[in-house]
Image: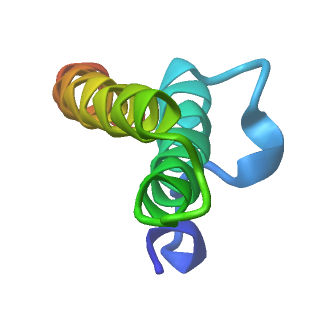
């Protein structure tokens, strides 16, 4: 919804605005976390792979938090 506010950077400002780059990376990691979480719950996967996917999901969540903090510091300018 913020993309539709007047004066707010658009998704096409990827190369010109650091905030947009951070937010796109953050949202891509949210999708990757969801995929890893779903795959980690499938019983058809070997246990070692399920544990790896769960740890990867947890790592992605930590990175998403850091990116969110960075986005707050940079601001949408």
Of residue 68 and residue 63, the one placed in the foreground of this image is 63
Q: Residue at x 19, y 33 (%)?
A: 65
- Residue 20 is left or right of residue 76, and the answer is right
Q: Is residue 28 above or below residue 51?
A: below
Of residue 53 and residue 16, the one placed in the foreground of this image is 53
Residue 53 lies in what quarter of the image? top left
- Residue 10 is left or right of residue 60, and the answer is right
Residue 25 lies in what quarter of the image? top right
- Residue 77 is left or right of residue 44, and the answer is left
Q: Residue at x 43, y 27 (%)?
A: 48
Q: Is residue 49 above or below residue 15?
A: below
Q: Position of residue 38 (x, y in %)?
A: 50, 65
Q: Position of residue 28 (x, y in %)?
A: 61, 44
Q: Quadrant of the C terminus?
A: top left
Q: Residue at x 49, y 27 (%)?
A: 22
Q: Position of residue 20 (x, y in %)?
A: 58, 36
Q: Is residue 9 above or below residue 72?
A: below
Q: Position of residue 64 (x, y in %)?
A: 31, 34
């Amino acid at each position: 919804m913020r993309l539709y506010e007047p004066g707010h950077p658009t998704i096409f400002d990827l190369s010109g605005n650091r905030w947009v780059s951070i937010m796109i990376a953050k949202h891509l990691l949210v999708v990757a976390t969801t995929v890893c979480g779903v795959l980690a719950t499938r019983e058809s996967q070997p246990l070692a792979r399920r544990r790896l996917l769960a740890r990867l999901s947890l790592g992605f969540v930590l990175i998403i938090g850091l990116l969110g903090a960075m986005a707050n510091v940079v601001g949408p300018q």
